[in-house]
Amino acid sequence: MFTQTPLNRPQQLVQSDNRFEYQNHTEQQLIPDNSSVWPIIGRIHSLETCGTVDGPGIRFVIFTQGCCLRCLYCHNPDTRNPKYGLEVTVDELMLEIQKYRSYMQFSGGGVTISGGEPLIQPKFVGEIFRRCQELKIHTALDTSGYTNLDPAIKYVVDYVDLVLLDIKSFTPHTAREVTGVSIYPTLKFANYLKKINKPTWIRFVLVPNWTDNINNLEGLAKFIATLDNVKKVEILPFHKMSEYKWESLGYEYQLKNTDPPSLENIQKAKNIFKNYGIPLI
């Protein structure tokens, strides 16, 4: 799918429907950031060429490799290790993206970079977004917001048309239990997006007995209500479709005995957000 490059990297390509997954379990040496000669390289886990759930319209979705969070319900635990995946150049990806440009333009779609966590590769991700905007292609960043607001991150955000911000929880204790990290960097990132008036969609996963506590929902809704750049919120019901991935990787799946939320509980959660005047998907 990618053009041949001098990298000569061993790879395995697995196609499932319109999604291509790459795996490379050989540690590679990344080209230093201070090089002005070599192409910009990053690591990706997979591509989805006609995605419809990660932003408006039909989208070319890049799933990057590597993530600092350890979410109990992670759908792609195989993206955790930053040493796995396939090394690709920005040039290679841009060639692929342009093959689907007509689909994106016709549907009002674009390019979404998800993960893993894209912001752990800011130079790579920022350059893809910059090149996309040069071509008038809509850009969306799907992120947990767990990052430092240093110049490299702000550079990425400058070339993003829409942020899909995954707020895993609101109360600090619950957030750490669910993700293994603090929620404060995410909240700080959300406030930065408000400050620069960056269009944002919020995503929240409703997990019974974990994130569905009334105080957690009320706190999150109240916080989001202060963000006038947020265009909509999506409450995603927990599911166990990724359980087989955890087992195949030898990871303990702690939510084995957790059922998806009932329709009644989903509606209760939605009502809390509606009470704060928050638009829902």
Image (cartoon, rainbow, N blue to C red):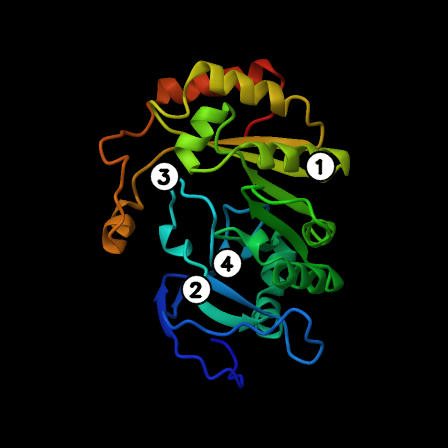
Q: Position of residue 49 (x, y in %)?
A: 50, 61
Of the image marks 3 and 1, the number of the one nearer the N terminus: 3
Say what secondary structure mark 2 lies in. Answer: loop
The residues tagged by marks 4 and 2 sit, at their Cα atoms, a distance apart of 11 Å
Left or right: residue 74 compared with residue 108: left
Tell me the kind of residue under disc 1.
Answer: Tyr
Q: Nearer the viewer, residue 52 or 210?
A: 210
The residues tagged by marks 2 and 1 sit, at their Cα atoms, a distance apart of 30 Å
Judging by the rendered image, the residue that carries numbered circle 4 is 64
* Figure disc tally: 4
Q: Position of residue 183 (x, y in %)?
A: 53, 32
Say what secondary structure mark 4 lies in. Answer: strand
Of the image marks 2 and 1, the number of the one nearer the N terminus: 2
Of the image marks 4 and 2, the number of the one nearer the N terminus: 4
Q: Which one is in front in this view, the residue at disc 2 or the one at disc 1?
A: 2
Q: State the image quarter where residue 84 is shown.
A: bottom left
Q: Nearer the viewer, residue 163 or 18?
A: 163
Tell me the kind of residue under disc 2.
Answer: Lys
Judging by the rendered image, the residue that carries numbered circle 3 is 73
Judging by the rendered image, the residue that carries numbered circle 1 is 192
